[in-house]
Amino acid sequence: MKPSNPPEIAVVLVNLGTPDAPTEAAVRRYLKQFLSDPRVIEIPQFIWQIILNLFVLRSRPKRVAHAYASVWDGDSPLRKITLAQVDLLQQRFDQQQLHCKVSVHAAMTYGKPALTDVLSALTAKKVEQIVMLPAYPQFSGSTTGAVFDVVAKWGLKQRNLPSISFVKDYFAHPQYIQALAESVKRFQAQHGKPEKLLLSFHGIPEPYEQKGDPYARRCRCTAAHLAQVLGLERHEWECSFQSRFGKQEWVKPYTDVTLTEWGKQGIKSVQVLSPAFSADCLETLEELAVENRQTFQSNGGGDYHYIPALNVDAAHIDLFESLALPHVQAWQQNLQGWY
């Protein structure tokens, strides 16, 4: 006997996470969860927990909370943008001629809405087909890998597991590269073409790459594809890595060091884009747009502009739809006996 309601397929758009408020206490809770993940910090946990609790969580939350307060507008930019992306993607699926219901949900690896809570709510509704869409263009064990971990650990406690498919990444997807290129062109139509375009990606520790993490290589591939589509000469652009944490070596070149050198060279204009971020957040709005502007200009550099992330750009939502739709259609074929 077929169910009276059509089967539901869920698409879960996952991002990293954010504190609940721009306060020291909320930031401390968030950082404790985030920095306790062995995917993020690979130091032996018994040693790292001592460092984390005695030093990092005593000094860092106050400074980070101040930075969050500078970009907070009722909620964190990352959560607001992710929720808006989900609403727009839901509209796209509502317009599709599908024989099943598709629901789109936001989730965070750390903080709220917690991925485990979203998965539990879906299974409570008897949703058995889930498409996981981590909003990380370039796969890394410390980001997308952490999403896999959360799902796997959640699954250990489930008696009846749903069918789950994953979008691993989309670092060279033509729609992604074209969306980035169009965002740069629109920005430059208003602000002019700079002497240098810096493509700054969130960094990872160098040992992670040496152990096989493909992230930095994927970032360099994204940058090269984008530069090619924009028709840039090699001296007109650079790929760099930001947001270092701790004392170990991270993948290079470093964004702040690059901007310092360019400032000292007297570079008159720089525009910075961060293709690793699907939504603007603290690392783009405060670190890139404010801190690194000061770094560049205090060392003699000239004009500096940050180009926003793709956020809710229509081409970005097109991309998300293109990434998720084949998975949805595959599940629909699997469920065709239900309707």
Image (spheres, rainbow, N blue to C red):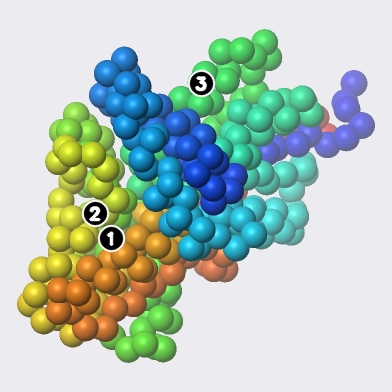
Mark 2, residue position: 241
Position of residue 310 in the picture relative to residue 6 (left or right): left
Q: CA distance from mark 3 to mark 2?
A: 30 Å
Amino acid type indicated by mark 2: Phe
Disc 2 and disc 1 in contact, CB within 8 angstroms: yes
* Residue at image point 20% right, 61% down: 256
Position of residue 318 in the picture relative to residue 102 (left or right): left
- Please name which of the two marks, 3 or 1, marks the residue nearer to the observer: 1
Q: Which mark is residue 63?
A: none
Q: Secondary structure at mark 3?
A: helix
Ranked by sequence position, the earlier of labels 3 and 2 is: 3
Q: Quadrant of residue 255?
A: bottom left
Amino acid type indicated by mark 1: Ser
Amino acid type indicated by mark 3: Ala
The picture places residue 297, in percent across and down from the top left corner, at 22, 76
Mark 3, residue position: 152
Q: Is residue 206 visible?
A: no
Task: Reply above or below: 195 against 316.
Answer: below
Which quarter shows the C terminus?
A: top right
Disc 3 and disc 2 in contact, CB within 8 angstroms: no
Circle 3 Cα neighbour tier, 10 Å, few/some/many (<14 / 14–19 / ≥20): few
Disc 3 and disc 1 in contact, CB within 8 angstroms: no
Q: Is residue 24 visible?
A: yes
